[in-house]
Amino acid sequence: MKRIVAPFASDPENSRGRVVAEAESPLRTAFARDRDRIIHSQAFRRLKHKTQVFVFHEGDHYRTRLTHTIEVAQVARTVARALGLDEDLAETLALAHDLGHTPFGHAGERELDKLMRPYGGFDHNAQSLRILTKLERRYALFDGLNLTWETLEGLVKHNGPLINAEGDPVGRYRERGLPEALLEYAADHELELSSYASAEAQVAAIADDIAYNAHDIDDGLRAGLFGLIDLGDVPLAGESLSEVLRLYPDLEHDRLVHETVRRLMGDMVEDVITETRRRAEKFRPQSVDDVRSLGEWFVCFGSQMREKNRVLQSFLSDRMYHHERVEAIMDRARRVVRDLFGAYMADAGLLPASWRGSAVKDDTPRYARQVCDFIAGMTDRYALEQHKRLFDLDPLFR
């Protein structure tokens, strides 16, 4: 079947380019090359031992940041293909969206942000940008991965504009302002922070929502944080479960869970494709810049699905993310981050040699950012090993 390319799709042949000019690859588009650089990065490999919800020791079958990222990429490619968008760019942004996360999930991020408040705070999206433009050191001619403008723009703005037309921070940055890493980069390289990102970036963002809603139901059931009966009155999940029970009334538990989750994902994917096609007919964007300047989301759920998704996320927040078992382990995880930060701030000699050589202890904010970069890049396992080495204490298991 011949593939139709939408007029508002990002075109790798018309990319705004890279900060450091490079010869084009004869075998890969610019966006495919970005994707491959991310896959081969150290930060991407570390995702395999970073928490999604459950710390690695709790079981081999729970999602990690890596398996979550792969699932997001699969959904993003499916949606991008259906909408006639550039699949490589959508996949690239899906693969990069969680690179800046700390060990121990959002608990680790909140603790590191709290510790870094005197020095500019911590934001995982800004940290992803630091990784891709500074902290990955693999190439002879530049720090970072020297990705295309479209990839960096999509990474920074996949959750919407960061500032309004007057330059004031909006959304999650309204109260505290833009993170330092974003300000530093935007000062030299304009990313048009007041506009929406490309349709491909918006696809990656909504694929993230779809993937984590579905797999968190799967992981929550597997962990016994709630049961199938609890899903009965939850929109999307309850509807999918009822359909499976009607078709297969005697299905064993594990198959019942999988059949429920796959239908839930399918319903969400179909809804976002239908709604985005409706918006394409309504707004008639003729270029990627038309999507950026639309002033509202282009790739999104319909109104009914948005409400169902909101209720489902509320259920997961109450019954999973704030479950006493999860909260207990995350309280201990926060202690690990807090102890490590305090130790490294007090003694630069505790840092590995590769980090110790560049430490600037007499410049406290700069040194704190180095410590932050080091801790943020840790896997759960490495953080626990370092805590054990420094304190002879394993706080997660005692």
Image: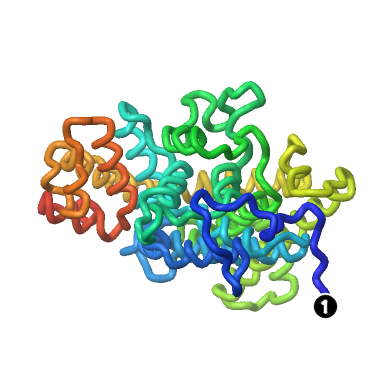
In this view, the residue in front, 183 or 277, is 183
- Which of the 4 image quadrants contains residue 264? bottom right
Q: Which residue is mark 1?
A: 1
Q: Amino acid at mark 1?
A: Met
Whole-percent x and y of residue 166?
63, 21
Q: Quadrant of the N terminus?
A: bottom right
Residue under the image location 21 percent in, 50 percent down: 355
Residue 309 visible in the displayed image? yes
Residue under the image location 43 percent in, 67 percent down: 40
Residue density around tag 1, few if under 14, some if 14–19, many if 20 or more, within 10 Å: few
In this view, the residue in front, 273 or 137, is 137
Whole-percent x and y of residue 187?
49, 33
Task: Judge whether 163 appears above or below 92 on screen.
Answer: above
- Residue 134 lies left or right of residue 169; in this view the side is left
Task: Judge whether 36 appears above or below 309 on screen.
Answer: below
Residue under the image location 79 percent in, 49 percent down: 287
At mark 1, the secondary structure is loop
In this view, the residue in front, 223 or 75, is 75
- Which of the 4 image quadrants contains residue 246? bottom right
Q: Quadrant of the C terminus?
A: bottom left
Whole-percent x and y of residue 39?
47, 66
